[in-house]
Amino acid sequence: MDRYEIVGGRRLEGKIRVQGAKNSVLPILAATVLTAGRCVIHNCPALSDTALTIRILRTLGCSAEWRQGSIFADSSVLSHLELSSVLTGKMRSSIVFLGPLLARCGRAKIAYPGGCRLGPRPIDLHLDGLRQMGAVVQEEEQHLLCHAPEGLQGARIVLSFPSVGATENLMMAAVLAKRKTTLMNCACEPEIVDLADFLTRCGAKIYGAGENTIEIEGVRALHGCEHTVIGDRIAAATYLAAAAITGGEIAVSGIEPENLMSMLAMLQKSGNEVFWEKNCCCLKAPPRLQALPQVRTMPYPGFPTDGLPLFLSLAAAAQGTSIFVENIFENRYSSVPCLQRMGASIRQEGKVAVVEGGSPLHGADVCAEDLRGGAGLVLAALAAQGISHIEGIEWIERGYEHFCENLTALGAGIWKK
Ligand code: UD1
């Protein structure tokens, strides 16, 4: 298995165009199942999860081809309505196929989703919502067996938590349901808006995406369309943080700055000069990073849980005490033991971590346990004195297209070996 070798202490400098958003492309590809036509999706990141989603589409009988960052999908014919654990077990977001399959075909059999180490990730909100729309859902030992005997019906659904996946699944189910659906306490993430934009281009009637309440007027059928996926706000924040932690300077384009405002504000508070214009964020690091004010993860527009491990590494390299509170997932602090081995002073219990920054980080041999925790380790290794080896990079590369090459182009000493 490959690992990264990183020689720390090199200043990162330059420009980078960020990849398309992983968390947009996966639900948008699932949504192509709703359309009886040809869709062209541009700005698709070259990631293993994208490839797996294409495999899922092909298993369902759709055609899907990936050419130079664009995916050409045609779901005119759906011949197979079952997804086995070989496909769903590797990727949590495979569950977002359930709503589209039920809406388009009235039935689906899907093995339970897997592929994540962030702690228990239930799907009760997805299933409760679909049941309220008239679906019969049998939770068997290995898989979900679902059908909608009368077709899906519009409903008023109040989510008990603004889950991103549940909002997406129910929005997709509702676009072909009979009558109007109102989703309340929805997630407001930019990827929800991107999905709604795609569906609207296909002929769906969706009002209020990006707000707490979304109304969807069901239509009889959707047609294909051409759509460009938004930039990846977490990847953009990662490259900005890489420049910040190495005392560097960077311009990240291909991103809507508004989508990462909470992280840009935190970068500013740690002493970086940060400015933005249309589709571009720029950062110039200070000679020494300062401690962060309290970082509390929240649903969008709050500070994103996916950004926490990145800023944990920044805090370890900064002067002073920073406090983190993780409110979304149980196992968000996977990188802490490795950061401690690199010399970071972090006390963590439950959802809270206290980072006493200032002690110099040194290279170490460490292992990524999940995607963003792994990216946090890369950041720490870039700042550390000496050489680090990072194993488990398949986790990291689930979320970052050409990560090693991009960091090398910015001046990092990183090799995949
Ligand atoms: C998505 C993102 C992920 C991000 C997360 C939170 C994708 C592919 N992944 O994941 O990168 O970290 O949003 O911003 O878009 N929950 C329930 N019941 C449910 C669903 C969720 O209790 O039915 C809970 C989860 O356990 C978790 C919280 O709600 O504690 C947030 O989960 P959710 O917003 O659904 O995250 P995902 O859509 O899985």
Image (cartoon, grey):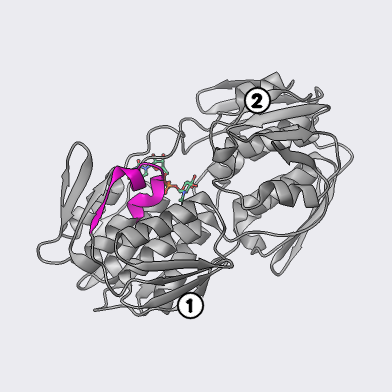
| Residue occupied by mark 1 | 226
Q: Position of residue 272 (x, y in %)?
A: 81, 47
In the rendered image, is residue 323 in sight?
A: yes
Element type at marker 2? Answer: strand
Element type at marker 1? Answer: strand
Q: Along the horizontal axis of the image, is 374 left or right of 164? A: right
Q: Position of residue 269 (x, y in %)?
A: 75, 44
Q: Along the horizontal axis of the image, is 413 left or right of 27? A: right
Q: Is residue 370 above or below residue 130?
A: above
Q: Residues within 10 Å of mark 2 (few under 14, many from 20)?
A: many
Q: Along the horizontal axis of the image, is 44 left or right of 147? A: right
Q: Residue furthest right?
A: 287
In the rendered image, is residue 184 in sight?
A: no
User: Residue at 55% of width from left, 28% of height from top?
Assistant: 334
Q: Is residue 301 above or below residue 389?
A: below
Sequence-wise, the earlier of marks 2 and 1 is: 1
Q: Amino acid at mark 2?
A: Val
Q: Residue 68 — which label?
A: none
| Residue occupied by mark 2 | 366
Task: Give the residues drawn in magenta, as a range.
Answer: 81-96
